[in-house]
Amino acid sequence: MQTFKNTAKEILGVVIISLAIVLPIRYFIAQPFVVSGESMDKTFQNGNYLIIDEISYRFETPKRGDVIVFKVPPEGLQISHYSSDQTVYFIKRIIGLPGETVEINGDQVKIYNKDNPNGFVLSEPYTYIDKLIPSPVSNVQEKVTLKDGEYFVMGDNRHNSSDSRFWGTLPASNIKGRVITRLFPLNEISIFPGSHNSYLK
């Protein structure tokens, strides 16, 4: 009987220690995220199982090309037909950074900043655009200047994405984290899947 009690105490101790290690990681460092929808095709597909790094942006600023998960702003909830009291997370790519001006001309994106006052067109090999399917998105024209702490995000499936073109800029405080790992499907396991930082100027 004493041996059983000792064993039970040991098991309970292991469980408590495991929870003390795992739970902080789960809630403050990394979290799972399952892709729902087609806005990031062909980079990510519906059902992809991802791990989100929640800590890196506490020490560094988000970069253009990072794929992030974020809490959808109220305007995005309204456009996407969610109730205002829902907490919904989207996955998109960072296109514009604080202080920059983003110009959208159909499927072309041009960035203006201190280093490029005349602007430069983004080279975006990750985008998926099916030109055989007519889309009103291909006619969007706008020019937005980002304030401090604001980002411009877009889905890689440009004709099928609810993003900053429609509901405005993304506050930095809404960013949950960046995608660091794809665990499913098994044949696509990768580190920093979809990341891109080789923009031509």
Image (spheres, rainbow, N blue to C red):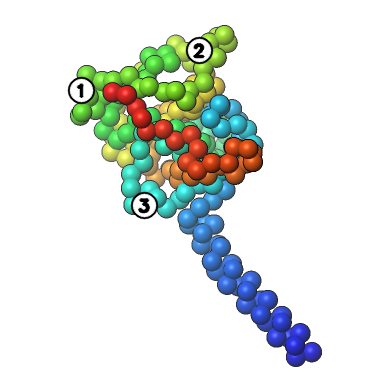
Q: Nearer the N terminus, badge 1 or badge 2? A: 1
- The alpha-carbon separation of the residues under discs 2 and 3 comes to 38 Å
Locate the N terminus and report the quarter of the image it occupies: bottom right
Q: x%, y% of residue 176?
A: 46, 46
Residue pictured at 30% horizontal, 31% vertical: 146
* Viewer-proximal residue among 9 and 191: 191
Q: Quadrant of residue 3?
A: bottom right
Circle 1 is placed at which residue position?
A: 117
Locate the C terminus and report the quarter of the image it occupies: top left
- The alpha-carbon separation of the residues under discs 1 and 2 comes to 29 Å
Q: Are marks 3 and 1 in contact (CB under 8 Å)?
A: no
- Tell me the tag on residue 163: none
- The alpha-carbon separation of the residues under discs 3 and 1 comes to 29 Å
Amino acid found under the numbered disc labelled 3:
Arg
- Tell me the tag on residue 136: 2
Q: x%, y% of residue 173?
A: 39, 45
Circle 3 is placed at which residue position?
A: 58
Q: Residue furthest right?
A: 1
Q: Nearer the N terminus, badge 2 or badge 3? A: 3
Amino acid found under the numbered disc labelled 1:
Pro
Q: x%, y% of residue 114?
A: 20, 29
Residue pictured at 28% horizontal, 29% vertical: 100
Q: Quadrant of residue 115?
A: top left
Circle 3 packing at 10 Å, graded few (<14), some (14-19), many (20+), is few
Q: Secondary structure at mark 3?
A: helix
Question: Of the residues tagged 1 and 2, which is closer to the observer?
Answer: 1
Above or below: residue 106 compared with residue 185: above
